[in-house]
Amino acid sequence: MVYFIIVLAYLFGAIAVIAVALIGVSFTRTQRDRIPMLRRLDGKKLQLVIIAVACYLLNYALLASKDILTMRQAVDIITLPNGGIAQRATDERFKNEIQNRAAQLTQEAFDYFRAGTRDLLAQRYRDATLNYSKSVSLIPTMSGYLNLAVSQWLMEDLKAAEKSLRTGLVVAQNNGDKEFVAHFYGNLSFFASRDGNQEEAKHLISEALKIFTQNNRQSSIALSLMTLGALFTREDNYDEALKYFKRARAIYDSIEEPLMHGMTLIINRCISICTSR
């Protein structure tokens, strides 16, 4: 009902604007001869004035009624057990409020996230950390926690980075987003390895590899294989490490990107180390 009234109000408003425009415009004889409808307007400026005023009044009345209806929908009158009455906010009003607030929070979270990205790319890691922290405090997002962890990592605050990764992993699992789950697994494998838990590290990166393989994420597959190779190297299992390094190199060689060429050089160095053992 409210939306119908709004449409009618703008329709009458448009008619009023057109009528006012026609009152103030003079047409040449050639234009009148070419467009028969213009000839019908001759001597009818008074009627156009009446139409314009009437449509403006209708526009105002409809918009006013829309506001009244909206206010009425905001609350209901309820009868109390003692016979009194009270006003109760309606479900529709509550829905509108939370939608408006959600839109506001979404914009604020995005603004902080975007500012954090600018700071990260400019190597202002402390500022990036602050902005990403504000973003996830408003809306806990997987992207926000991942970038927050990267910023903290680059600040060498590894304890905070691990905490952000674990929090982001929970968000990703709750959202059912396997792709982000895999990225969090891959990053957390570093901390497991750092703490001396090689088996957990290999398990985490292997789980990430499964997901990346299912989604055909070639660069992520290669990076996971490379990480597994590095983990086996730490165990002095160079034969096993060599298998993963060679698989990673084959993928990097197939990807025609400058960054992949750099990764191939790193892989070749790792392979050289393994073969010399």
Image (cartoon, helix red, strand yellow):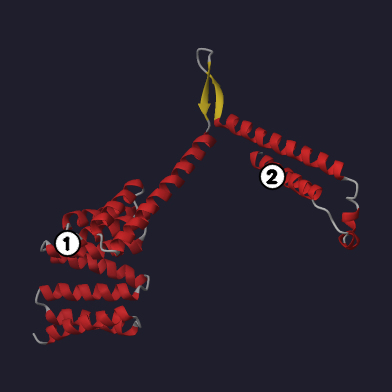
How many numbered circles does the render carry?
A: 2
Q: x and y percent of residue 189 in the render? A: 20, 64
Q: x and y percent of residue 246 in the render? A: 23, 83
Circle 1: element type: helix
Q: x and y percent of residue 12 in the render? A: 74, 43
Res 172 → quadrant: bottom left
Out of 81 and 131, give the one closest to the viewer. 131
10 Å neighbourhood of mark 2: few (<14), some, or many (≥20)?
some
Out of 132 and 169, give the one closest to the viewer. 132
Sequence-first disc among 1 and 2: 2
10 Å neighbourhood of mark 1: few (<14), some, or many (≥20)?
some
Please indicate whether residue 92 sits to the left or right of residue 181 in the image: right
Q: Is residue 77 above or below residue 241?
A: above
Circle 2: element type: helix
> What residue is disc 2 on?
10
> What residue is disc 1 on?
191
Q: Is residue 203 above or below residue 127?
A: below
Q: Residue at x 28, y 76 (%)?
A: 222
Q: Residue at x 68, y 40 (%)?
A: 5
| Quadrant of the image containing the N terminus | top right
| Quadrant of the image containing the C terminus | bottom left
Q: x and y percent of residue 24 in the render? A: 79, 49
Q: Is residue 54 above or below residue 29?
A: above
- Three-letter residue code for mark 2: Tyr
- Three-letter residue code for mark 1: Phe
Q: CA distance from mark 1 to mark 2?
A: 61 Å
Q: Residue at x 26, y 63 (%)?
A: 123
Tell me if I can see residue 169 in this picture: no
Q: Nearer the viewer, mark 1 or mark 2?
A: 2
